[in-house]
Image (cartoon, rainbow, N blue to C red):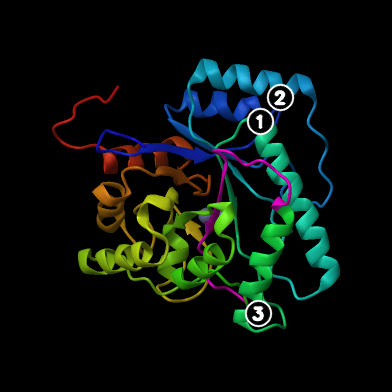
Amino acid sequence: MNKSNSPRIGLHTGIAGGLHNALLKARLLGADTVQIFSRNPRGWKARPLEAEEVEQFKRVREETGVTPVVIHANYLINLAAADEGIREKSVASFREEIERGLTLGADYLVLHPGSARGACESDAIRTCAESLKRACEGLELDSFRILLENTAGQGECIGHRFEHLREISERCPDLNLGVCLDTAHAFTAGYDIRDEDGLSAALDSLDANVKLENVLAVHFNDSKAAYNSRVDRHWHLGQGHIGADALRRVASHPRLAHAAFLLETPVDETCDDACNLEALRSFVRQPDQGEAA
Ligand SMILES: [Zn+2]
Ligand SMILES: [Zn+2]
Protein backbone atom coordinates (compact mmCIF):
# COMPACT_ATOMS: atom_id res chain seq x y z
CA MET A 1 0.00 0.00 0.00
CA ASN A 2 1.06 3.51 -0.79
CA LYS A 3 1.95 5.34 2.40
CA SER A 4 1.98 8.86 0.98
CA ASN A 5 -1.34 10.60 0.62
CA SER A 6 -1.35 10.74 -3.14
CA PRO A 7 -1.79 7.76 -5.44
CA ARG A 8 0.60 6.35 -8.00
CA ILE A 9 -0.34 7.58 -11.44
CA GLY A 10 0.11 6.23 -14.94
CA LEU A 11 -1.59 5.19 -18.12
CA HIS A 12 -2.56 2.43 -20.48
CA THR A 13 -0.01 2.30 -23.21
CA GLY A 14 0.84 0.24 -26.29
CA ILE A 15 3.36 -2.57 -26.63
CA ALA A 16 4.43 -1.97 -30.22
CA GLY A 17 8.05 -3.01 -30.66
CA GLY A 18 7.99 -5.15 -27.50
CA LEU A 19 6.30 -5.36 -24.13
CA HIS A 20 9.15 -3.51 -22.42
CA ASN A 21 8.46 -0.44 -24.57
CA ALA A 22 5.35 0.22 -22.49
CA LEU A 23 7.54 0.57 -19.40
CA LEU A 24 9.94 2.87 -21.22
CA LYS A 25 7.11 5.05 -22.48
CA ALA A 26 5.59 5.22 -19.00
CA ARG A 27 8.94 6.25 -17.57
CA LEU A 28 9.49 8.85 -20.29
CA LEU A 29 6.18 10.44 -19.39
CA GLY A 30 7.04 10.42 -15.70
CA ALA A 31 4.42 7.79 -14.84
CA ASP A 32 4.74 5.56 -11.76
CA THR A 33 2.53 2.73 -13.01
CA VAL A 34 1.35 1.27 -16.33
CA GLN A 35 -1.40 -0.81 -17.86
CA ILE A 36 -0.87 -2.93 -20.98
CA PHE A 37 -2.43 -5.65 -23.06
CA SER A 38 0.02 -8.53 -22.97
CA ARG A 39 -1.20 -9.58 -26.45
CA ASN A 40 -3.48 -8.51 -29.27
CA PRO A 41 -6.67 -7.50 -27.41
CA ARG A 42 -9.00 -8.34 -30.29
CA GLY A 43 -7.96 -11.85 -31.31
CA TRP A 44 -8.43 -15.26 -29.72
CA LYS A 45 -4.96 -16.41 -30.62
CA ALA A 46 -2.00 -15.04 -28.67
CA ARG A 47 1.59 -15.40 -29.73
CA PRO A 48 3.39 -17.22 -26.91
CA LEU A 49 5.80 -15.18 -24.82
CA GLU A 50 9.46 -15.79 -25.64
CA ALA A 51 11.87 -16.29 -22.75
CA GLU A 52 13.96 -13.43 -24.07
CA GLU A 53 11.14 -10.87 -24.09
CA VAL A 54 10.08 -11.91 -20.59
CA GLU A 55 13.62 -11.44 -19.35
CA GLN A 56 13.85 -8.06 -21.07
CA PHE A 57 10.52 -6.96 -19.63
CA LYS A 58 11.60 -7.87 -16.11
CA ARG A 59 14.95 -6.17 -16.50
CA VAL A 60 13.44 -2.92 -17.84
CA ARG A 61 10.85 -3.02 -15.10
CA GLU A 62 13.61 -3.23 -12.52
CA GLU A 63 15.46 -0.34 -14.18
CA THR A 64 12.43 1.90 -14.51
CA GLY A 65 10.81 1.04 -11.17
CA VAL A 66 7.38 1.18 -12.82
CA THR A 67 4.89 -0.45 -10.45
CA PRO A 68 2.29 -1.78 -10.22
CA VAL A 69 2.17 -3.38 -13.66
CA VAL A 70 -1.43 -3.92 -14.68
CA ILE A 71 -2.59 -6.13 -17.55
CA HIS A 72 -5.98 -5.61 -19.14
CA ALA A 73 -7.50 -8.88 -20.38
CA ASN A 74 -8.42 -9.06 -24.06
CA TYR A 75 -11.83 -7.90 -25.21
CA LEU A 76 -13.11 -11.18 -26.64
CA ILE A 77 -13.29 -12.88 -23.27
CA ASN A 78 -16.85 -13.24 -22.00
CA LEU A 79 -16.86 -15.44 -18.91
CA ALA A 80 -20.59 -14.75 -18.42
CA ALA A 81 -21.59 -16.01 -21.88
CA ALA A 82 -24.62 -18.27 -22.00
CA ASP A 83 -23.25 -19.77 -25.23
CA GLU A 84 -21.09 -22.73 -24.30
CA GLY A 85 -18.68 -22.38 -27.21
CA ILE A 86 -17.89 -18.75 -26.38
CA ARG A 87 -17.68 -19.53 -22.70
CA GLU A 88 -15.19 -22.37 -23.20
CA LYS A 89 -12.98 -20.23 -25.42
CA SER A 90 -13.21 -17.44 -22.87
CA VAL A 91 -12.18 -19.64 -19.95
CA ALA A 92 -9.17 -20.92 -21.91
CA SER A 93 -8.22 -17.43 -23.03
CA PHE A 94 -8.56 -15.97 -19.55
CA ARG A 95 -6.43 -18.74 -18.10
CA GLU A 96 -3.81 -17.88 -20.69
CA GLU A 97 -4.03 -14.20 -19.64
CA ILE A 98 -3.36 -15.22 -16.03
CA GLU A 99 -0.42 -17.41 -17.03
CA ARG A 100 1.08 -14.59 -19.09
CA GLY A 101 0.61 -12.19 -16.19
CA LEU A 102 2.33 -14.57 -13.79
CA THR A 103 5.17 -15.16 -16.25
CA LEU A 104 5.72 -11.42 -16.65
CA GLY A 105 5.57 -10.82 -12.91
CA ALA A 106 2.63 -8.42 -13.32
CA ASP A 107 0.64 -7.33 -10.27
CA TYR A 108 -2.96 -7.13 -11.48
CA LEU A 109 -5.12 -8.47 -14.29
CA VAL A 110 -8.22 -6.40 -15.09
CA LEU A 111 -11.31 -8.21 -16.35
CA HIS A 112 -14.74 -7.10 -17.55
CA PRO A 113 -17.29 -9.45 -15.95
CA GLY A 114 -18.93 -10.06 -19.33
CA SER A 115 -22.27 -9.94 -21.02
CA ALA A 116 -25.47 -11.79 -20.31
CA ARG A 117 -26.49 -12.12 -23.97
CA GLY A 118 -29.74 -13.94 -23.74
CA ALA A 119 -29.47 -14.99 -20.09
CA CYS A 120 -30.78 -13.00 -17.16
CA GLU A 121 -28.43 -10.89 -15.08
CA SER A 122 -28.31 -13.22 -12.08
CA ASP A 123 -27.51 -16.22 -14.29
CA ALA A 124 -24.75 -14.23 -15.97
CA ILE A 125 -23.24 -13.35 -12.59
CA ARG A 126 -23.26 -16.99 -11.54
CA THR A 127 -21.78 -18.09 -14.85
CA CYS A 128 -19.02 -15.49 -14.60
CA ALA A 129 -18.04 -16.71 -11.13
CA GLU A 130 -18.05 -20.36 -12.21
CA SER A 131 -15.93 -19.56 -15.28
CA LEU A 132 -13.47 -17.62 -13.15
CA LYS A 133 -13.01 -20.54 -10.81
CA ARG A 134 -12.44 -22.89 -13.72
CA ALA A 135 -9.95 -20.55 -15.39
CA CYS A 136 -7.90 -20.38 -12.18
CA GLU A 137 -8.06 -24.08 -11.31
CA GLY A 138 -4.68 -25.35 -10.14
CA LEU A 139 -2.86 -22.04 -10.63
CA GLU A 140 -0.86 -20.45 -7.80
CA LEU A 141 -1.83 -16.79 -7.92
CA ASP A 142 0.15 -15.75 -4.83
CA SER A 143 0.21 -11.94 -4.75
CA PHE A 144 -1.13 -11.62 -8.32
CA ARG A 145 -4.66 -10.20 -8.16
CA ILE A 146 -7.50 -10.40 -10.64
CA LEU A 147 -9.48 -7.16 -10.61
CA LEU A 148 -13.11 -7.02 -11.72
CA GLU A 149 -13.81 -3.78 -13.56
CA ASN A 150 -17.14 -2.02 -13.22
CA THR A 151 -18.79 -1.47 -16.59
CA ALA A 152 -20.96 1.20 -18.18
CA GLY A 153 -23.73 -1.37 -18.51
CA GLN A 154 -23.91 -1.07 -22.28
CA GLY A 155 -25.88 -3.79 -24.01
CA GLU A 156 -26.40 -6.66 -21.60
CA CYS A 157 -23.11 -6.25 -19.77
CA ILE A 158 -23.04 -7.14 -16.13
CA GLY A 159 -20.78 -5.32 -13.68
CA HIS A 160 -22.47 -1.91 -13.89
CA ARG A 161 -23.66 -2.18 -10.28
CA PHE A 162 -21.11 -2.62 -7.50
CA GLU A 163 -23.47 -5.32 -6.18
CA HIS A 164 -22.59 -7.44 -9.23
CA LEU A 165 -18.88 -7.23 -8.39
CA ARG A 166 -19.66 -8.22 -4.83
CA GLU A 167 -21.69 -11.22 -5.85
CA ILE A 168 -19.03 -12.49 -8.23
CA SER A 169 -16.32 -12.00 -5.58
CA GLU A 170 -18.36 -13.71 -2.90
CA ARG A 171 -18.92 -16.69 -5.14
CA CYS A 172 -15.15 -17.17 -5.54
CA PRO A 173 -13.74 -16.51 -2.06
CA ASP A 174 -10.52 -18.44 -2.76
CA LEU A 175 -9.57 -16.14 -5.64
CA ASN A 176 -9.29 -13.02 -3.46
CA LEU A 177 -10.65 -10.88 -6.30
CA GLY A 178 -9.97 -7.17 -6.30
CA VAL A 179 -11.72 -4.34 -8.11
CA CYS A 180 -10.79 -1.78 -10.74
CA LEU A 181 -13.00 1.31 -10.60
CA ASP A 182 -13.50 3.00 -13.97
CA THR A 183 -14.72 6.56 -13.35
CA ALA A 184 -16.31 6.98 -16.78
CA HIS A 185 -18.12 3.64 -16.56
CA ALA A 186 -19.41 4.35 -13.05
CA PHE A 187 -20.70 7.75 -14.17
CA THR A 188 -22.56 6.54 -17.24
CA ALA A 189 -23.85 3.53 -15.28
CA GLY A 190 -25.65 5.91 -12.92
CA TYR A 191 -23.21 6.77 -10.12
CA ASP A 192 -23.29 10.56 -10.15
CA ILE A 193 -19.79 11.44 -9.00
CA ARG A 194 -20.02 15.06 -10.18
CA ASP A 195 -20.50 16.52 -6.72
CA GLU A 196 -19.03 15.75 -3.34
CA ASP A 197 -22.11 14.01 -1.97
CA GLY A 198 -22.46 11.86 -5.05
CA LEU A 199 -18.84 10.80 -4.86
CA SER A 200 -19.17 9.96 -1.16
CA ALA A 201 -22.27 7.91 -1.86
CA ALA A 202 -20.53 6.01 -4.66
CA LEU A 203 -17.49 5.30 -2.47
CA ASP A 204 -19.74 4.21 0.39
CA SER A 205 -21.50 1.79 -1.92
CA LEU A 206 -18.20 0.51 -3.26
CA ASP A 207 -16.92 0.03 0.29
CA ALA A 208 -20.10 -1.70 1.45
CA ASN A 209 -19.97 -4.09 -1.49
CA VAL A 210 -16.32 -4.90 -2.08
CA LYS A 211 -14.34 -2.91 0.53
CA LEU A 212 -12.30 0.02 -0.71
CA GLU A 213 -9.04 -1.67 0.27
CA ASN A 214 -9.74 -4.13 -2.56
CA VAL A 215 -10.08 -1.32 -5.11
CA LEU A 216 -6.50 -1.59 -6.29
CA ALA A 217 -6.77 0.30 -9.56
CA VAL A 218 -8.76 3.27 -10.82
CA HIS A 219 -9.29 3.78 -14.54
CA PHE A 220 -9.24 7.52 -14.50
CA ASN A 221 -11.25 8.79 -17.45
CA ASP A 222 -13.61 11.62 -18.21
CA SER A 223 -16.72 10.67 -20.16
CA LYS A 224 -17.86 11.83 -23.58
CA ALA A 225 -21.19 10.13 -22.89
CA ALA A 226 -23.80 11.68 -20.62
CA TYR A 227 -24.67 10.69 -17.08
CA ASN A 228 -26.67 7.46 -16.83
CA SER A 229 -26.47 6.90 -20.62
CA ARG A 230 -24.96 3.41 -20.25
CA VAL A 231 -22.59 4.35 -23.05
CA ASP A 232 -18.85 3.70 -22.80
CA ARG A 233 -16.94 6.66 -24.27
CA HIS A 234 -13.78 7.72 -22.49
CA TRP A 235 -12.72 11.32 -22.89
CA HIS A 236 -9.94 13.77 -22.07
CA LEU A 237 -9.73 14.80 -18.41
CA GLY A 238 -11.75 17.90 -17.69
CA GLN A 239 -13.32 18.02 -21.16
CA GLY A 240 -16.15 15.57 -20.65
CA HIS A 241 -19.38 15.29 -18.67
CA ILE A 242 -17.64 14.49 -15.38
CA GLY A 243 -15.45 17.58 -15.50
CA ALA A 244 -12.24 18.77 -13.88
CA ASP A 245 -13.58 19.66 -10.43
CA ALA A 246 -15.17 16.27 -9.93
CA LEU A 247 -12.13 14.41 -11.27
CA ARG A 248 -9.86 16.37 -8.95
CA ARG A 249 -12.00 15.27 -5.99
CA VAL A 250 -11.67 11.64 -7.08
CA ALA A 251 -7.90 11.82 -7.64
CA SER A 252 -7.21 13.54 -4.33
CA HIS A 253 -9.68 11.47 -2.32
CA PRO A 254 -7.94 9.92 0.70
CA ARG A 255 -10.08 6.79 0.48
CA LEU A 256 -8.60 5.99 -2.95
CA ALA A 257 -4.99 7.06 -2.35
CA HIS A 258 -3.80 3.44 -2.11
CA ALA A 259 -4.98 2.62 -5.64
CA ALA A 260 -3.03 2.92 -8.90
CA PHE A 261 -4.61 5.61 -11.11
CA LEU A 262 -4.43 4.79 -14.81
CA LEU A 263 -5.55 6.86 -17.78
CA GLU A 264 -7.41 5.23 -20.66
CA THR A 265 -7.98 8.46 -22.50
CA PRO A 266 -7.84 8.96 -26.28
CA VAL A 267 -4.93 10.47 -28.16
CA ASP A 268 -5.90 13.16 -30.67
CA GLU A 269 -5.09 16.72 -31.67
CA THR A 270 -6.76 18.26 -28.58
CA CYS A 271 -4.83 16.27 -25.99
CA ASP A 272 -2.48 13.29 -25.84
CA ASP A 273 -1.08 11.04 -23.09
CA ALA A 274 1.38 13.64 -21.82
CA CYS A 275 -1.37 16.24 -21.67
CA ASN A 276 -3.83 14.00 -19.79
CA LEU A 277 -1.11 12.76 -17.46
CA GLU A 278 -0.21 16.34 -16.65
CA ALA A 279 -3.86 16.98 -15.76
CA LEU A 280 -3.95 13.88 -13.54
CA ARG A 281 -0.71 14.95 -11.88
CA SER A 282 -2.15 18.36 -11.10
CA PHE A 283 -5.27 16.71 -9.62
CA VAL A 284 -3.38 14.45 -7.22
CA ARG A 285 -0.72 16.92 -6.19
CA GLN A 286 -1.32 18.33 -2.76
CA PRO A 287 -0.53 22.06 -2.55
CA ASP A 288 1.94 21.60 0.33
CA GLN A 289 3.79 18.64 -1.14
CA GLY A 290 6.01 20.40 -3.65
CA GLU A 291 7.72 18.07 -6.12
CA ALA A 292 6.99 14.52 -5.02
CA ALA A 293 9.92 12.14 -5.26
ZN1 LIG B 1 -11.65 -2.15 -19.22
ZN1 LIG C 1 -11.55 0.97 -17.94
Q: Is residue 48 visible?
A: yes
Residue shown at 81% from the left, 74% from the top: 83
Contact (Cβ within 8 Å) of mark 2 with mark 1: yes
Task: Classify residue 135 by image quadrant.
Answer: bottom right
- The N terminus: image quadrant: top left
> Magenta span has 141?
yes
- The span picked out in magenta is 136-155
Looking at the rendering, which quadrant does residue 243 occupy? bottom left
Q: Which residue is mark 1?
A: 104
Q: Give the side of residue 168 with respect to residue 3, left or right.
A: right
Question: Does mark 3 have its CB less than 8 Å from ligand 1?
Answer: no
Secondary structure at numbered mark 3: helix
Q: Nearer the viewer, residue 156 or 125?
A: 125
**Any part of residue 79 in sight:** no
- Disc nearest the viewer among 3 and 1: 3
Q: Which mark is residue 54?
A: 2
